[in-house]
Amino acid sequence: MARRALILIEGGALGCGLLYVQAAQRLGLHPINLSANQDQRDFLSAGCETIHVDTGNLDALVHECSRLRATNEIAGIVCAKEGGGVYATVGKLCQYFDLPGPNPGSIERCFDKFAQRQLLADADIPIPAYRLATNATDVKNAATEIGFPLILKPAVGAGSCGVRLCRSADEVAEHTTYLLGGKHIWRSSPRILVEEFAQGPLYLTYTMGDEVVGIGTCDFGRPPYFVCRETIFPAVLTDEEHKRIADVSLSCLRALDLGWGPTNIELRWTRLGPVVIEVNPRLASAPHSQLVQLAYGIDLITEHIKLVIGGEWYLHKRRSHTAAVRSLLPDRDGILDWISGDGRAAAVSGVAEVKLFVEPKTPIVRKGDYRDKIAYVVAASPSHAQTAAILQRAVDLIDWSITPFPTLGEQEQFDLNSSRVGQGVDL
């Protein structure tokens, strides 16, 4: 009898891939990871078969899946990686092999933030004012029309890469130069979304299919960048606020034809009520996707796999707790001398996970996006106040030291001294 395999395309960002592997194994499936990344030690250690393949090539993926189907029953194909290209490809693979999956056309339109904005606007869903720009003149004109403060962001991208708050024409010019001057890595032809800055608290709606699973809140690090610092589930909302956010979120799914699978939606509560910032047709990256499980007892990754293999999902809430994650962000660039306290933090009652992303002697260069995170702590308890206290207690136990990079003058003096030492010169 052929084993039932779950094909995982490119694992996932920030650890989601391994969570899918573990969930698949609990469901009696044999996970097989197809990836263009040569380094797959984590997947191998988790007992996941890994095959190197160009995941940007649909024909190559079809060929590999066809080969695997000769000795396996392919129960489903899934992707947890951020980014529209691979996720849309998964939808095309599912269609080719007649398996449940997302609509690739809807996914591609959704990951194009300009196309997404147009569809939401056509459906009369509240969104910030926006313009599309392809050069510096377009950006300058759009900024004049929209006014300050405003957001500049790539029309296609994820993880807050290239996203910046601009409060003046000089800041717009500076960030435009960064985006178009060769420093930003574009996933497609350079297109910039110039967007009104909708001011107010940020909320996150997690959905599965056409059901709202939960609504959380998110806080960012210091502007002008948008690096998520803390996420809490559930958000503290009145019944009316919850209903308005849920209604707008479900309207987004209808407007974008996203009634299949997981989605996370970002909204800000402005003086006019909820305004949609972004719709992402996927689960949030780890550990944010686990907050729902800690808060409600709903394992979204397992339920997603059930959907992928054509089974029945179960979204009934088993508990009502508060779960939160705090990301630790460096306050300077430089060389990480040491980081410690993660073991003590993990031992605090109520802490679910502590993860470090860096090791001593690692160069720290802040980029203003998700890559700035050096660690995170996850905590949960029956109450909002208790969870906040646990999280703060654990975070306070983690400390680190960063030695700033030498200034140009210091580096020149260091090089000169090194040269003299090498020549036997007394100092």
Image (spheres, helix red, strand yellow):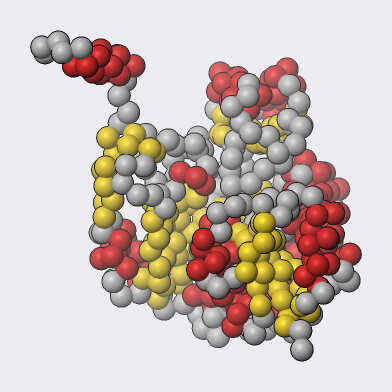
Quadrant location of residue 117?
A: top right
- Count of labels in the image: 0
Q: Position of residue 339 (x, y in %)?
A: 28, 51
Residue at point 40%, 68% (across, down): 353
Q: Position of residue 381 (x, y in %)?
A: 40, 76
Residue at point 37%, 34% (across, down): 333
Residue at point 31%, 46% (across, down): 360
Q: Is residue 386 above or below residue 411?
A: below
- Residue 303 visible? The answer is no
Residue lying at the far left in this picture: please name it: 426
- Left or right of 41 in this view: 85: right
Quadrant where the C terminus lies? top left
Quadrant where the N terminus lies? bottom right
Residue at point 63%, 27% (across, down): 179
Q: Closer to the camera, 47 or 112? A: 47
- Left or right of 32 in this view: 343: left
